[in-house]
Image (tube, grey):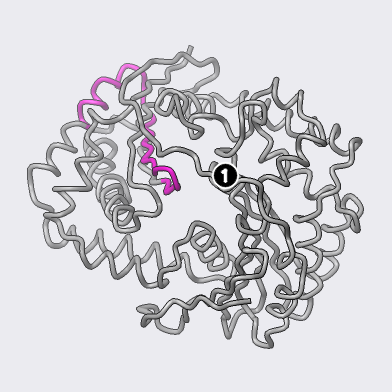
Amino acid sequence: MSDIDVPGVSLLPGLGEPHHHRLASGAELVTLPLADAPLVCLDFWCRAGSAFETTAESGMAHFLEHMVFKGSGRLAAGEFDRRIEALGGSSNAATGFDDVHYHVLIPPQAAGEALDLLLDLVLHPRLEPGAFDMERRVVLEELAQTEDQPEEVAVQQLLSRACPDHPYGLPILGRRPALLAHDPAAMAAFHRRLYGGSRCVLSLSGALADGDLIRRVSDGPLASQEAASEDSRPAALELTPGEARLELPRLEAARLLMAWWQPPAADLDGVMGADLATSLLAEGRRSRLVDRLREQLRLVESIDLDLHAMECGSLALLEAVCEPEDLPQVRQAIGEVWQEVIDREVGEQEWLRLRRLVTNAYRFGLESAGALAGLIGNSTLWGRRHSLSRPLELLEDWSPERLRASALPLLDPARAFVLEAVPA
């Protein structure tokens, strides 16, 4: 096992820097002790999100996440959850476009046993046919519930039209015909292809004082995991500007949805600029769009602009809820507000408020073992071994002038795909 340390002085008092270890299999272990933490977080990450599926594998990444909890060669279905709960812990998992992760929060004295259970479950899922068919029904019901929510349908339509030639435009839950065709053999092949050593990271944060967990990992199954049979990445995201209108039954109010391309997660400086720009426009009552459209004009019930940092290219997604007849005015007002921030410099007090919002949001995300394990695990998975303070350092390089010159132009309404969703 080799060490890969990140030098530098932290700008986050009381918080050290993660320590990286390369295992024999090519997998990485990243650790960050927290002296006062009451728990340990074990977070297993893998580059096996829905973006890596073939057309025939649609929904396989999320379906596999479900099947992992149905047991391994040593664990019966449901045994993992029962034993983790008996140890005083909790577990969960999530599948995204880029990756999937499985995490456990556990008291320190039980962390070693929980680690053995987690790695056995994730690296050696049983994929028993009876459990497979039963869990397929669960996944199909989850898909049906999503399709029954008009708001969810509208967002998926926005992504599919804005990203028509990219996996980000496809539903993570998958397509029903493909889900019906999946079988355990195909899922086992998917697991072998993508859950290999070099595509995996285990992150540990919290009460790690005695070093036993690190020894267990270096001598355990993750260190001997076979290599993945592929190490490709999806193509870079290209967003197609345009507009569409969609009538949806049971939609209670109109939705104006807009999507913009933003810099990929690897461009940390660009992501910080995008964070500043989206916060300026729609973070809090004093932000430009919220103040104009909700407080002054009272055109919208709500307006949100969220940044989703992703590996192939990030997305800024806006949602404004309003009456159908107000959609033209809402779109006009959004364009006017954007033009104003391009034409006139941001004032000193507004800039200080904006910087404080972004800084505090980042700092607040570092307050628990679970949040830290997720951050360092995801960053390591994608080769970003920068200091935890690096985002705050990059924030210092941004100014109102630079924001107007480089980040805000990416939110030009003319660059967006715009979807108007109205009640049928």
Q: Is residue 285 magenta?
A: no
Q: Residue shown at 37%/80% (left/top)?
A: 8
Q: Nearer the viewer, residue 326 or 103?
A: 103
Residue 118 placement, left or right of 386: right
Q: Is residue 314 magenta?
A: yes
- On screen, residue 130 above or below 232: above
* Magenta span of residues: 308-334
Can residue 301 be spotted in the picture? no
Can residue 269 be spotted in the picture? yes
Residue 91 placement, left or right of 45: right
For the N terminus, give its image quadrant: bottom right
Q: Residue shown at 68%/54% (left/top)?
A: 196
Q: Residue shown at 73%/42% (left/top)?
A: 64
Q: Position of residue 107 (x, y in %)?
A: 73, 75
**Label 1 residue SS:** loop
Q: Position of residue 80 (x, y in %)?
A: 84, 58
In which quadrant of the rendered view does residue 144 lie?
top right
Q: Nearer the viewer, residue 272 or 155?
A: 272
Q: Position of residue 166 (x, y in %)?
A: 46, 31
Residue 4 placement, left or right of 357: right
Task: Tell me the amino acid under the disc marked 1.
Answer: Gly
Q: Which residue is mark 1?
A: 96
Residue extending farthest to the left is 344
- On screen, residue 301 above or below 12: above
In which quadrant of the rendered view does residue 61 lie?
top right
- On screen, residue 292 above or below 6: above
Q: Position of residue 264 (x, y in %)?
A: 38, 48
